[in-house]
Image: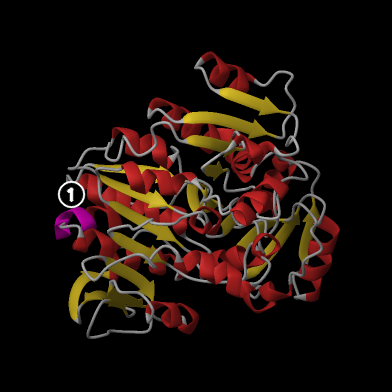
């Protein structure tokens, strides 16, 4: 680790437990900081709090004590999910106390260069693709962030010859100050998390933190097909690497129906690519560009492109059985993600959809419902989605109370050559604690067939 002395004796408040809070507290404590953890969860049965206390870290649970910042804290490290309207966060900002998320710690201590990936959709797929390319290319990558291990824990063990591949959300990026990846990737930008950020502009500004500190010696890979991102690209000092899905370009990475091009020259035939969907081409182009810039050889990149079929719960190929292909896209918790899934397949689709009812419209899906053969509806939005599907001209529509029943009904409505796709367009919390649990249940139900 670098900068190990910079936190010694510093009075730090870690706001929120969860994985990132526990990791940040333990790291800062090991670096000699005086750490206090404050979490709103109850004291009773709080195993994480007890373990931190055993390590010598002060923990306050059950709410935020009034005047907690009067204790002279010089830094607040908050859980990314805690909104900036939180009274402790507001008080810290008014006092001029820095408020970070743990990826700022990651950057400050990491000996390894960082490649960071953000975007409204596709972050996890891009991160995973790039990790596999670097791994096969023998670049000693370490994967971190939302996708798995807390990034500051990864950075704690990283060496100079490693590369940290870091998935970063807008929540995490908003809490950065000096964060400067060697390569940054901004895949796309759509309306998302506006309840957290307050506006689309504030959300976009948070995403821009991925490149705002970069220098000319760094690289910024960005979606040149989106003018909104292009405006931000004009403001970075980094060397710009645009990607485009609209045909061959002279610079950067691009694609047409036949090939992927690097600086205008054919690089890889699209015929070898296993990952379905036009939207996944954004992920493929940005990951490939980062791999090339990291010194990966073409063989390693081709190996991944010709074998990678998707990330768990994100357009994940599950099984082909009786000439039907089953896909798990449980991560599609909004209509934008489901729209991308529906455009990935040319043949008839039996769609499993529905979940938590947030009152949002499904109208964005209407132009993409033409190849939907049948729909099985689940969860709180089952009736609403059934009505929407019927208005789109879908005739075979069933409602299910359970995932097992839904999979059986989907199979009964299918024919040889069909795709059976779980892409709910809704969050999972009406029936499941997470989209991962929902996706796992779908996979189990498919296997039980």
**In front: 103, or 260?**
103
Quarter occupied by the C terminus: top right
Q: Is residue 300 magenta?
A: yes
Picture coordinates of residue 232 (x, y %)?
A: 43, 78
**In front: 265, or 307?**
265
**In front: 201, or 256?**
201
Task: Tell me: residue 200, above or below residue 305.
Answer: below
User: Is residue 291 among what the camera can see?
Assistant: yes
Q: Along the horizontal axis of the image, is 379 left or right of 176? A: right
Residue at x 51%, y 42% (from the top left corner): 74
- Give the quarter of the image for residue 248: bottom left
Q: How many marks?
A: 1
What secondary structure characterizes most of the magenta part? helix
- List the residue tagged with mark 1: 137
Picture coordinates of residue 352 (x, y %)?
A: 68, 55
Residue at x 42%, y 31% (from the top left corner): 9
| Residues drawn in magenta | 296-302
- Crowding near the residue tagged with mark 1, few <14, some 14–19, many ≥20 C-alpha atoms within 10 Å: many
Picture coordinates of residue 183 (x, y %)?
A: 29, 61
């Amino acid at each position: 680790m670098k900068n190990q002395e910079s936190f010694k004796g510093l009075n730090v408040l870690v706001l929120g437990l969860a994985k990132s809070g526990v990791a940040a507290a333990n790291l800062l404590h090991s670096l000699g900081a005086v750490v206090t953890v404050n979490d709103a969860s109850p004291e009773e049965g709080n195993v994480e709090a007890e373990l931190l206390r055993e390590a010598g870290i002060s923990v306050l649970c059950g709410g935020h004590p009034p005047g907690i910042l009067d204790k002279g804290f010089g830094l607040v490290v908050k859980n990314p999910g805690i909104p900036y309207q939180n009274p402790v966060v507001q008080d810290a900002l008014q006092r001029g106390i820095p408020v970070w998320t743990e990826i700022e710690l990651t950057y400050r201590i990491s000996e390894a260069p960082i490649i960071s990936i953000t975007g409204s959709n596709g972050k996890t797929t891009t991160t995973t693709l790039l990790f596999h390319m670097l791994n096969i290319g023998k670049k000693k990558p370490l994967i971190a962030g939302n996708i798995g291990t807390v990034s500051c824990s990864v950075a704690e063990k990283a060496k100079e010859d490693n590369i940290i591949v870091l998935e970063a959300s807008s929540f995490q990026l908003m809490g950065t100050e000096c964060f400067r990846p060697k390569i940054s990737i901004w895949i796309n930008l759509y309306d998302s998390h506006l309840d957290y950020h307050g506006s689309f502009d504030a959300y976009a500004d948070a995403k821009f933190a991925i490149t705002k500190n970069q220098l000319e010696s760094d690289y910024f890979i960005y979606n040149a097909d989106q003018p909104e991102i292009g405006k931000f690209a004009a403001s970075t000092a980094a060397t710009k690497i645009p990607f485009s899905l609209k045909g061959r370009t002279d610079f950067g990475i691009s694609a047409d129906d036949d090939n992927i091009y690097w600086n205008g020259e054919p690089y890889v035939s699209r015929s070898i690519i296993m990952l379905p969907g036009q939207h996944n081409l954004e992920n493929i182009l940005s990951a490939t560009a980062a791999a090339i810039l990291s010194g990966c050889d073409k063989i390693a990149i081709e190996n991944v492109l010709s074998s990678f079929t998707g990330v768990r719960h994100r357009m994940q190929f599950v099984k082909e059985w009786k000439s039907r292909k089953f896909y798990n896209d449980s991560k599609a918790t909004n209509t934008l993600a489901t729209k991308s899934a529906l455009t990935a397949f040319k043949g008839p689709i039996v769609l499993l959809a529905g979940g938590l009812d947030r009152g949002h419209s499904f109208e964005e899906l209407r132009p993409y419902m033409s190849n939907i053969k049948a729909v099985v509806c689940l969860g709180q939005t089952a009736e609403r989605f059934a009505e929407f599907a019927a208005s789109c001209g879908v005739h075979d529509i069933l409602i299910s109370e359970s995932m097992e029943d839904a999979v059986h009904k989907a199979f009964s409505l299918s024919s040889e050559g069909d795709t059976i796709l779980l892409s709910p367009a809704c969050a999972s919390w009406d029936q499941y604690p997470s989209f991962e649990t929902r996706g796992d249940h779908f996979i189990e139900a498919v296997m039980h067939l």
